[in-house]
Every structure is written in structure tokens, then in C-alpha cells.
Image: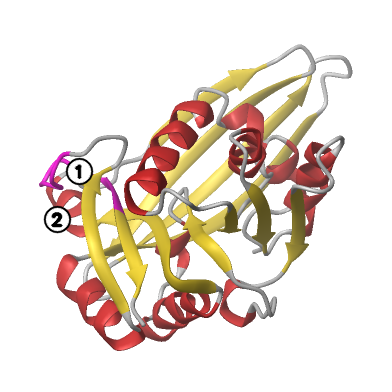
Amino acid sequence: MIVFGDLYSQYYDLLYQDKDYQAEVNYVTSLIQQSSSEAQTILDLGCGTGKHAELFCAKGFIVHGVDLSKDMLDVAEKRRIGKESKLSFSHANVQNLRLNKKFDVVTSLFHVMSYQNSNQELTQAFRVAKEHLIDDGIFIFDFWYGPAVLTDLPTTRIKRLENDQIKVTRLAEPILYAQKNIVDVHYNIFLKDKETQNFVEKRELHSMRYLFDTELELICNEVGFDILNKYEWMSQNTPNFNSWNVVWILKNSI
């Protein structure tokens, strides 16, 4: 089953219309400015439909977004109109990305690192980030935080949304594999065309890895990153057992 397939990408922004992308970009921009006030270029790993990237561009950054889904990138390309010199996108797997270019900042948002399920995949993703950073460049990523996930276990959730054209119902059913630190989230997405009354159903599996401080510290040491800060997402609080979403700010050590 393909993650972020054509149907999912088509309605992605509708499904997350309650997500405050502007506030998130403001927050990450503040993290960048705290650590690298001269930063001008950003590589966005797992950019999706490019909404974060577009807003970073509006902040004055030159941004290149990368995603595995061509369907998502088709949506992202529309955001480039009038910004062609400052906003670009390309198709690639984060594991084998080779742009032969360095950036001031690498971002990876909306839990992209949690999609790296194995130690090898996660370490390689960190290596790719490092290879695309200037000396002392900054890597900012968020992820599912293990202590919080195991404190407040994932449960079945239903999300209903609609606009003038469609009505969407998304059922998310999680299965947790404790020995692998992975949650398999099974999505059933039902879409109704309001004009024709036709229904479409799509199923997807998203395998999400929850991560712990000690394993990430080990990878940072192996790859060559200094840990600047660890925060609860959208704050500067120290992560705790209630912090499902956590962000780390790393520096490329020379």
C-alpha cells in the first residue's frame, strides 16, 4: 500500500485544514534565528504539498523541498508560481538524496523522521541531513516521543471534514508493536462527491516509529551532530510524559 497516494495527497490540505502551518513556521523560524541568525537557505526533507516550504519562502528564505510522493509534489509545484527563484521542489527518497548542494538549515517536519522505521533508515536520514548542511549548519526535526506514546497509548480516531465539493471521513486504527517501537496506523479514507453523490474509499498503512533520547543521542554522536536543544513541539518546554510531539535542534559538528 503506497503511503501518501494520489487520493490522500489530493485531499491532504483539507484533512489538515485545522493545522496552523503559519504558527509552526513562525516557531521553527524562531528556532533557526536562535541558532543561526545568518541562515538564508533551507532544505525541507519530506515537504509534502509544500505548505511549510512556501511559508518559509515568504519569511525570506530560499527553500528547496524534497518528497517521496510525486502526487504531493504536483500540489507543491503550484505554490512556486511567482516564487520560482526562491522556491523549488524535487522527487527523492530521503535515504538516497544527493543534491550536491549545501544548505544553512535542514528541516524535517510533521514526523518525517518517525517514518524511518529501522535503525539503518534513521541513521541514513541523519547522514543525508548532515551531507547537505554547511559547517555548523542546523538540523531541525520533530518526531513521536517514546515516553509520551507509551504513557498515552494510541487509540482509534475518526476525523470528519468537508468543503463545497467533498465530504471526508478518515478512520485511523493503530496497532502498537512494543519490541519494535512502531505504531502501524491503518487509515480508511472515505470521500463523497457532493455533486454526484459518488463514494470513494482508500486504505493506507503508515508505520510510525516513536523515538527515545538515548537512541537519538547515540545516532547524533555516530553521525556527527551536536545537540543544541530539545523542546516540546511549539514551545520551549522540556519534553515530558505528555509530549507526544517533540522537536530537536542539532548543529553539524565539524
Residue drawn at (75%, 56%) of the image: 89
Judge whether 250 appears above or below 151 on screen: below
Q: Amino acid at mark 2?
A: Pro
User: In the rendering, at what x and y percent does residue 252 appear?
Assistant: 38, 73
The span shown in magenta is 237-247
Residue drawn at (32%, 57%) of the image: 249
Q: Which quarter of the rendering shows the C terminus?
A: bottom left
Residue drawn at (77%, 53%) of the image: 88
Say if mark 1 contacts mark 2, CB within 8 Å. Answer: yes
Marks 1 and 2, how far apart at CA:
8 Å
Magenta part mainly helix, strand or loop?
loop
The residue pinned by badge 1 equals 243
User: In the rendering, at what x and y percent does residue 67 appear?
Assistant: 67, 60
Q: Quadrant location of residue 98?
A: bottom right
Q: Amino acid at mark 1?
A: Ser
User: In the rendering, at what x and y percent does residue 71 appear?
Assistant: 78, 52
* Extreme-top residue of the structure: 164
Q: Name the element at disc 1.
A: loop
- Answer whether residue 226 is magenta in the image: no
The answer to whether residue 146 is left or right of residue 116 is left
The residue pinned by badge 2 equals 147
